[in-house]
Image: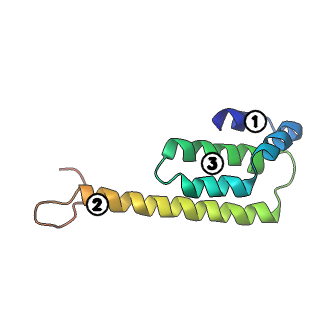
Amino acid sequence: MKLLGHCGEGKNSLTEGIAADRLSIDDLIENLRMADFCYPLKSSLIYFMDTIYFDVEKDVTDENIAKMNMVIEIIYEDLEGFIRIEQRVMKSKDGKPKFGVE
């Protein structure tokens, strides 16, 4: 994914179009949802999305901007899940969550 994302660097609409044909933004969003806590994959998907769909030579469509809001929501949900896991791991013996390292 990251290698394909590099195709979009330099704002070349031809290579951006070829890469976008290989993986649609809807497929990217679906893969982000399925990847759960696989952050290396999510990082690559977001890099691809940024270079192929948003940091581009042509204008970004309103539809793609709306889809970016979905991606932000997925990232937000991931952060909430990560915080919940960290709080469970950091619980002290008395059952109260710790918010830092001693």
Scheme of image coloration: rainbow
Image coords of residue 37 (percent x, y): 46, 51
Image coords of residue 62 (percent x, y): 80, 65
Say which residue label 1 marks: 9
Q: Could you give the CA–CA distance between mark 3 and mark 1, rounded to whole angstroms?
A: 14 Å
Of the image marks 3 and 2, the number of the one nearer the N terminus: 3
> Which image quadrant is residue 81 in?
bottom left
| Front residue (pair 102, 38) | 38
Asked which secondary structure carries label 3, the reply is helix
Mark 3 vs mark 1: give the one in front. Answer: 3
Amino acid type shown at disc 3: Ile
- Residue 70 in view, yes or no: yes
Q: Could you give the CA–CA distance between mark 3 and mark 2, rounded to whole angstroms?
A: 26 Å
Asked which secondary structure carries label 2, the reply is helix
**Tags 3 and 1 touching, CB below 8 Å:** no
Residue lying at the far left in this picture: please name it: 94
> What residue appears at the point 79 percent right and 41 percent down from the top-left corner?
19
Say which residue label 2 marks: 87
Of the image marks 2 and 1, the number of the one nearer the N terminus: 1
Say which residue label 3 marks: 46
| Front residue (pair 50, 29) | 29
